Image (cartoon, rainbow, N blue to C red):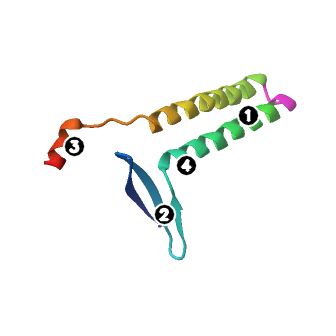
Amino acid sequence: MPKIERKAHEVENAIEEDIEIQGKRFRVYFQNRYTILSLAVDLLTGFFYILGSVAALTSIPDRIGMYFYLAGSIFLTIRPILRIIKNIFIYDDLKAEKKKS
């Protein structure tokens, strides 16, 4: 089973989390977990739109194709939400003051 680690590094008063997956021989390092989530959402969006298109071209009932298009639309909505979450930072001024003291 691959070993998955999270690493944090500071970027302008904020902390970004990276993900590292270590197998037996290779190690995969993903910088910034939100980038990986965004790419996964993009892949799922494309996948659902392809399935919807195939369903529209074949004898599969129209309702199934519409569900695939609906799922793709939901994932298109998730992407900007992930970007908003990525760019929101909450700072604890009291905690920062205690560190300085």
Instruction: Return the mark for residue 36.
Output: 4
Between marks 4 and 3 in the image, the one whose residue lies nearer the viewer: 3
Residue 91 is drawn in which quadrant? top left
Residue 51 is drawn in which quadrant? top right
Residue located at (49% from left, 32% from top)? 84
Gap in angstroms between the C-alphas marked 1 and 3:
46 Å
Between marks 1 and 3 in the image, the one whose residue lies nearer the viewer: 3
Q: Percent position (x, y) of residue 43?
A: 66, 43
Secondary structure under badge 4?
Answer: helix
Q: Are marks 2 and 1 in contact (CB under 8 Å)?
A: no
Say which amino acid is labelled 1.
Tyr
The residue lying toward the viewer, choosing from 76 and 63, is: 76
The residue lying toward the viewer, choosing from 82 and 99, is: 99
Q: Earlier in the sequence, mark 2 or mark 3?
A: 2
Gap in angstroms between the C-alphas marked 2 and 4:
13 Å
Residue located at (56% from left, 31% from top)? 80
Q: Earlier in the sequence, mark 1 or mark 3?
A: 1
Judging by the rendered image, the residue that carries numbered circle 1 is 49
Magenta range: 56-61
In the displayed structure, does residue 22 sit left or right of residue 61? left
Instruction: Tell me if residue 23 comes above or below residue 62 in the rendering.
Output: below
Q: Are marks 1 and 3 in contact (CB under 8 Å)?
A: no
Say which amino acid is labelled 3.
Ala
Q: Percent position (x, y) of residue 1?
A: 47, 67
Q: Main secondary structure of the magenta part?
A: loop
Q: Earlier in the sequence, mark 1 or mark 4?
A: 4
Judging by the rendered image, the residue that carries numbered circle 3 is 96
The residue lying toward the viewer, choosing from 63 and 84, is: 84
Judging by the rendered image, the residue that carries numbered circle 2 is 21
Q: Percent position (x, y) of residue 85?
A: 45, 34
